[in-house]
Amino acid sequence: MPSVASGTPLFIANNLALDFINTTYGMGLRHCDCFDDDSSVLEWLRLAGILPDDCRRAPAGLAKLARALRDNARTVILAAKTASPAEPVVINQVLESGRPTQELAWDATSNEFKIVRHRHNVNAASLLEPVAQALVHLLLHENLQLVRQCEAHDCTLFFHDQTKSHRRRWCSMASCGNRMKAAAHRARKSGQ
Ligand SMILES: [Zn+2]
Protein backbone atom coordinates (compact mmCIF):
# COMPACT_ATOMS: atom_id res chain seq x y z
CA MET A 1 0.00 0.00 0.00
CA PRO A 2 1.37 3.43 -0.88
CA SER A 3 1.49 5.80 2.08
CA VAL A 4 -0.03 8.59 -0.04
CA ALA A 5 -3.24 8.04 -1.99
CA SER A 6 -3.34 9.07 -5.62
CA GLY A 7 -5.44 12.19 -6.04
CA THR A 8 -8.03 13.42 -8.50
CA PRO A 9 -6.67 16.47 -10.34
CA LEU A 10 -8.48 19.66 -9.28
CA PHE A 11 -8.58 22.71 -11.48
CA ILE A 12 -10.01 25.28 -9.10
CA ALA A 13 -7.23 27.86 -8.83
CA ASN A 14 -7.86 30.05 -11.92
CA ASN A 15 -4.15 29.78 -12.56
CA LEU A 16 -2.03 27.08 -14.17
CA ALA A 17 0.91 27.38 -11.75
CA LEU A 18 -1.39 27.22 -8.70
CA ASP A 19 -3.34 24.27 -10.13
CA PHE A 20 0.05 22.59 -10.50
CA ILE A 21 0.93 23.28 -6.85
CA ASN A 22 -2.54 21.98 -5.89
CA THR A 23 -1.74 18.52 -7.28
CA THR A 24 -0.93 17.46 -3.75
CA TYR A 25 -3.54 18.18 -1.13
CA GLY A 26 -5.25 16.94 2.03
CA MET A 27 -3.65 16.40 5.39
CA GLY A 28 -2.67 13.32 7.37
CA LEU A 29 -4.47 10.18 6.23
CA ARG A 30 -6.32 12.15 3.56
CA HIS A 31 -3.11 13.30 1.91
CA CYS A 32 -3.30 12.78 -1.87
CA ASP A 33 -0.81 13.18 -4.68
CA CYS A 34 -1.81 13.41 -8.35
CA PHE A 35 1.78 12.83 -9.41
CA ASP A 36 2.21 9.13 -8.54
CA ASP A 37 4.29 8.32 -11.58
CA ASP A 38 5.40 9.68 -14.94
CA SER A 39 2.16 8.80 -16.74
CA SER A 40 -0.03 10.52 -14.12
CA VAL A 41 1.93 13.75 -14.68
CA LEU A 42 1.45 13.33 -18.44
CA GLU A 43 -2.30 12.96 -17.85
CA TRP A 44 -2.35 16.13 -15.71
CA LEU A 45 -0.54 18.09 -18.45
CA ARG A 46 -3.13 16.82 -20.94
CA LEU A 47 -6.04 17.88 -18.68
CA ALA A 48 -4.38 21.27 -18.19
CA GLY A 49 -4.28 21.69 -21.98
CA ILE A 50 -0.51 22.11 -22.24
CA LEU A 51 0.55 18.67 -23.51
CA PRO A 52 1.90 18.86 -27.07
CA ASP A 53 -0.18 16.79 -29.52
CA ASP A 54 2.79 14.72 -30.58
CA CYS A 55 3.68 13.60 -27.05
CA ARG A 56 2.10 10.29 -26.11
CA ARG A 57 4.68 8.75 -23.82
CA ALA A 58 6.02 10.29 -20.64
CA PRO A 59 9.75 11.00 -20.74
CA ALA A 60 11.78 9.37 -17.97
CA GLY A 61 12.03 11.35 -14.76
CA LEU A 62 8.87 13.41 -15.40
CA ALA A 63 7.23 12.72 -12.01
CA LYS A 64 10.47 13.32 -10.12
CA LEU A 65 11.06 16.68 -11.79
CA ALA A 66 7.36 17.64 -11.50
CA ARG A 67 7.38 17.00 -7.74
CA ALA A 68 10.63 18.95 -7.30
CA LEU A 69 9.22 21.86 -9.35
CA ARG A 70 6.04 21.76 -7.29
CA ASP A 71 7.94 21.94 -3.97
CA ASN A 72 10.10 24.78 -5.24
CA ALA A 73 7.10 26.66 -6.68
CA ARG A 74 5.21 26.46 -3.37
CA THR A 75 8.25 27.68 -1.41
CA VAL A 76 8.81 30.58 -3.79
CA ILE A 77 5.15 31.66 -3.86
CA LEU A 78 4.86 31.61 -0.06
CA ALA A 79 8.12 33.55 0.26
CA ALA A 80 7.10 36.12 -2.36
CA LYS A 81 3.78 36.70 -0.57
CA THR A 82 5.68 37.78 2.54
CA ALA A 83 8.34 39.69 0.54
CA SER A 84 11.00 37.18 1.65
CA PRO A 85 13.77 35.73 -0.51
CA ALA A 86 13.79 32.11 -1.72
CA GLU A 87 15.96 30.22 -4.19
CA PRO A 88 14.06 29.33 -7.39
CA VAL A 89 16.56 26.54 -8.16
CA VAL A 90 14.27 23.99 -9.84
CA ILE A 91 12.17 26.69 -11.55
CA ASN A 92 15.32 28.07 -13.17
CA GLN A 93 16.50 24.60 -14.10
CA VAL A 94 13.18 23.94 -15.92
CA LEU A 95 13.23 27.38 -17.60
CA GLU A 96 16.75 26.73 -18.82
CA SER A 97 16.65 23.09 -19.93
CA GLY A 98 13.06 23.22 -21.18
CA ARG A 99 13.44 26.45 -23.09
CA PRO A 100 12.04 26.28 -26.62
CA THR A 101 13.77 27.97 -29.51
CA GLN A 102 11.84 30.66 -31.28
CA GLU A 103 12.07 31.94 -34.78
CA LEU A 104 10.48 34.66 -36.78
CA ALA A 105 8.40 33.23 -39.63
CA TRP A 106 6.05 34.54 -42.26
CA ASP A 107 2.44 33.42 -41.83
CA ALA A 108 0.83 33.19 -45.26
CA THR A 109 -2.67 32.96 -43.76
CA SER A 110 -2.60 36.25 -41.88
CA ASN A 111 0.04 37.84 -44.12
CA GLU A 112 2.20 38.91 -41.23
CA PHE A 113 5.25 37.76 -39.35
CA LYS A 114 4.83 35.72 -36.21
CA ILE A 115 6.99 33.98 -33.64
CA VAL A 116 7.04 30.20 -33.89
CA ARG A 117 8.23 28.25 -30.87
CA HIS A 118 9.93 24.86 -31.31
CA ARG A 119 10.92 22.39 -28.68
CA HIS A 120 14.44 20.95 -29.04
CA ASN A 121 13.16 17.57 -27.96
CA VAL A 122 10.50 16.18 -25.66
CA ASN A 123 12.01 15.82 -22.23
CA ALA A 124 10.65 16.31 -18.73
CA ALA A 125 11.82 19.93 -18.55
CA SER A 126 10.32 20.91 -21.91
CA LEU A 127 6.92 19.52 -20.88
CA LEU A 128 7.03 21.40 -17.56
CA GLU A 129 8.38 24.66 -19.01
CA PRO A 130 4.86 26.16 -19.57
CA VAL A 131 4.16 25.64 -15.85
CA ALA A 132 7.38 27.45 -14.92
CA GLN A 133 6.44 30.27 -17.32
CA ALA A 134 3.00 30.55 -15.70
CA LEU A 135 4.67 30.80 -12.31
CA VAL A 136 7.02 33.54 -13.56
CA HIS A 137 4.02 35.46 -14.91
CA LEU A 138 2.19 35.11 -11.60
CA LEU A 139 5.20 36.33 -9.59
CA LEU A 140 5.99 39.26 -11.86
CA HIS A 141 2.65 40.48 -13.11
CA GLU A 142 -0.08 39.60 -10.63
CA ASN A 143 -1.02 40.99 -7.26
CA LEU A 144 0.18 38.32 -4.83
CA GLN A 145 -2.30 39.51 -2.19
CA LEU A 146 -4.88 37.80 -4.40
CA VAL A 147 -2.95 34.52 -4.33
CA ARG A 148 -4.27 32.83 -1.23
CA GLN A 149 -4.89 29.48 0.40
CA CYS A 150 -8.36 28.19 1.24
CA GLU A 151 -9.46 29.38 4.69
CA ALA A 152 -10.61 25.93 5.81
CA HIS A 153 -8.23 24.85 8.58
CA ASP A 154 -7.64 21.45 7.00
CA CYS A 155 -7.28 22.59 3.39
CA THR A 156 -4.04 23.69 1.73
CA LEU A 157 -5.33 24.53 -1.75
CA PHE A 158 -4.16 27.74 -3.41
CA PHE A 159 -6.23 29.95 -5.69
CA HIS A 160 -5.93 33.23 -7.55
CA ASP A 161 -8.88 35.35 -6.45
CA GLN A 162 -10.34 36.85 -9.60
CA THR A 163 -13.71 37.75 -8.13
CA LYS A 164 -14.74 41.39 -8.48
CA SER A 165 -15.00 41.86 -4.72
CA HIS A 166 -11.69 40.03 -4.07
CA ARG A 167 -13.38 38.22 -1.21
CA ARG A 168 -13.00 34.63 -2.33
CA ARG A 169 -12.32 32.54 0.77
CA TRP A 170 -12.58 28.94 -0.30
CA CYS A 171 -11.05 26.56 -2.82
CA SER A 172 -14.64 25.80 -3.74
CA MET A 173 -17.99 26.72 -2.22
CA ALA A 174 -19.24 23.18 -2.89
CA SER A 175 -16.63 21.55 -0.68
CA CYS A 176 -14.86 23.73 1.90
CA GLY A 177 -17.23 26.71 1.73
CA ASN A 178 -20.35 24.78 2.70
CA ARG A 179 -18.45 22.56 5.11
CA MET A 180 -16.99 25.52 7.05
CA LYS A 181 -20.27 27.43 7.01
CA ALA A 182 -22.08 24.40 8.44
CA ALA A 183 -19.37 24.06 11.11
CA ALA A 184 -19.69 27.75 12.01
CA HIS A 185 -23.47 27.37 12.19
CA ARG A 186 -23.14 24.36 14.53
CA ALA A 187 -20.66 26.28 16.69
CA ARG A 188 -23.05 29.25 16.95
CA LYS A 189 -25.93 26.95 17.86
CA SER A 190 -24.01 25.10 20.56
CA GLY A 191 -22.88 28.47 21.95
CA GLN A 192 -26.47 29.67 22.45
ZN1 LIG B 1 -10.56 24.20 0.67
Image (cartoon, rainbow, N blue to C red):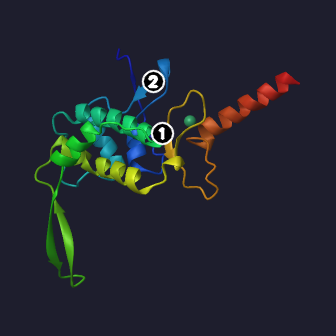
Amino acid type shown at disc 1 = Thr
Residue 120 lies, in percent from the top left, at 10, 53
**Quarter that holds the C terminus:** top right
Residue 34 lies, in percent from the top left, at 37, 33
Who comes first in sequence, dot 2 or dot 1?
A: 2
Label 1 environment density (alpha carbons within 10 Å; few <14, some 14–19, many ≥20): few
Check disc 2 and report its element: helix, strand or loop.
loop
Residue at x 25%, y 37% (from the top left corner) = 89
**Quarter that holds the N terminus:** top left
Label 2 environment density (alpha carbons within 10 Å; few <14, some 14–19, many ≥20): some
Kindly give the residue lying farthest to the bottom in the view shown.
Answer: 111
Classify residue 149 as left or right of residue 1: right
Residue 95 lies, in percent from the top left, at 22, 48
Amino acid type shown at disc 2 = His
Query: Disc number at residue 31?
Result: 2
Q: Is residue 56 visible?
A: no
- Taking the image as four quarters, which one is ligand 1 found in? top right
